[in-house]
Image (cartoon, rainbow, N blue to C red):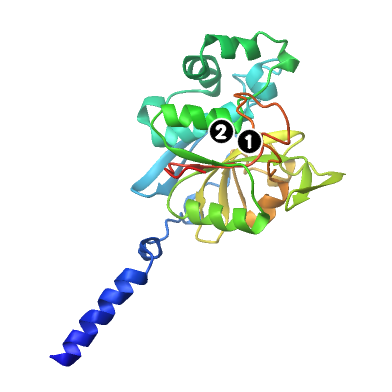
């Protein structure tokens, strides 16, 4: 009896001190199940989520539907990334396009005055929705999110990978310069962006790579365009930690519009 009692006490102690999240199985997607040919205007990718597969629609900014002199072609990376994420989380928005998101959803949630303040400008002066603005839309669409503005590289790698392994997406802002813990190099590097760019990270593969939904084409990625693959330790070098906070709904500066969003996350930071 004494032996059984000791075992019972030890099991209770382990349950008390073992974090619940450490018991959860990691959600990953076999890379072999993902197409290597996604150089198309629109592509639907199936990624494993916390409750089963999620289908995300990934749109090209420079597709046949978007002439070069259109908002989506020139500034639509954030609307494209947001539309992609919404398509996987809410059936209501599964058929939204980046055009509809920017013209309808932004106007509805931000209000006519704020929306017109951006889109009444000349096309070159218009700006994409900011990460802060994206969190406003996600939350209104019943997809809770956490905006992480300030980060060190190791923290971002760990937190983003852990979040992706819960079966949930992440949105990130990347630069055309490398950085290390917030110190940005003066040298240009166009691997992920020719300027500033918003990407949706949809999950992790069984090979430890991040599944990246990208609205832009990159020559280095060959036929893998709407869906690309990389490792967080490489991608974080192009991400942008904020230096200050902003509640601007549209992108206004590199200092205040960087960071990343943990999608379907209820924590507040």
Judge whether 107 appears above or below 2 on screen.
Answer: above
Residue 63: quarter of image: top right
Label 1 sits on a secondary structure element that is strand
Q: Residues within 10 Å of mark 2 (few under 14, many from 20)?
A: many
Image position of 183 (left or right of 77): right
Q: Name the quadrant of the N terminus.
A: bottom left
Say which mark, if any, is on residue 40.
Answer: none
Q: CA distance from mark 1 to mark 2?
A: 7 Å
Residue 51 visible, this orientation: yes
User: Residue 153, position in %: x, y?
Assistant: 67, 55
Judge whether 33 appears above or below 259 on screen.
Answer: below
User: Residue 163, position in %: x, y?
Assistant: 48, 52
User: Marks 1 and 2: CB-CB under 8 Å?
Assistant: yes
Rendered residue at 51%/14% (across/down): 107
Say which mark, if any, is on residue 81.
Answer: 2
User: Residue 191, position in %: x, y?
Assistant: 75, 44
Residue 26: quarter of image: bottom left
Judge whether 259 appears above or below 84 on screen.
Answer: below
Rendered residue at 51%/13% (across/down): 111
Residue 59 visible, this orientation: no
Q: Nearer the viewer, residue 54 or 250?
A: 250
Label 2 sits on a secondary structure element that is helix
Rendered residue at 38%/61% (across/down): 25
- Outermost residue, left side: 1
- Outermost residue, bottom side: 2
Rendered residue at 62%/42% (across/down): 149
- Outermost residue, right side: 187
User: Residue 122, position in %: x, y?
Assistant: 73, 10
* Earlier-in-chain disc, 1 versus 2: 2
Q: Residues within 10 Å of mark 1 (few under 14, many from 20)?
A: many
Q: Nearer the viewer, residue 243 or 185?
A: 243
Which residue is disc 1 drawn over?
A: 198
């Amino acid at each position: 009896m004494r032996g059984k009692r000791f075992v019972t006490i030890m099991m209770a102690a382990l349950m008390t001190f073992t974090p619940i999240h450490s018991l959860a199985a990691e959600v990953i997607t076999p890379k072999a199940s993902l197409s290597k040919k996604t150089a198309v205007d629109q592509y639907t990718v199936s990624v494993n989520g916390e409750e089963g597969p999620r289908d995300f629609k990934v749109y090209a900014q420079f597709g046949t539907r978007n002439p070069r002199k259109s908002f989506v072609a020139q500034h639509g990376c954030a609307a494209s990334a947001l539309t992609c994420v919404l398509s996987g989380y809410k059936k209501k928005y599964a058929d939204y396009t980046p055009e509809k998101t920017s013209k309808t959803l932004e106007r509805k949630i931000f209000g006519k005055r704020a929306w017109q303040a951006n889109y009444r400008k000349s096309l070159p002066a218009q700006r994409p929705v900011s990460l802060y603005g994206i969190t406003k839309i996600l939350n209104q669409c019943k997809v809770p999110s956490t905006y992480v503005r300030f980060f060190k590289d190791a923290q971002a790698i760990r937190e983003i990978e852990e979040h992706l392994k819960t079966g949930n997406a992440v949105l990130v802002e990347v630069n055309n310069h490398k950085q290390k813990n917030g110190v940005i190099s003066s040298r240009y590097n166009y691997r992920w962006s020719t300027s500033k760019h918003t990407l949706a990270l949809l999950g992790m593969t069984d090979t430890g790579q991040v599944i990246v939904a990208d609205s832009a084409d990159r020559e280095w990625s060959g036929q893998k365009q709407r869906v690309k693959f990389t490792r967080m330790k490489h991608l974080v070098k192009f991400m942008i930690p904020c230096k200050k906070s902003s509640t601007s709904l549209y992108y206004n500066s590199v200092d205040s519009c960087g960071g990343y969003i943990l999608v379907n996350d209820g924590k507040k930071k």
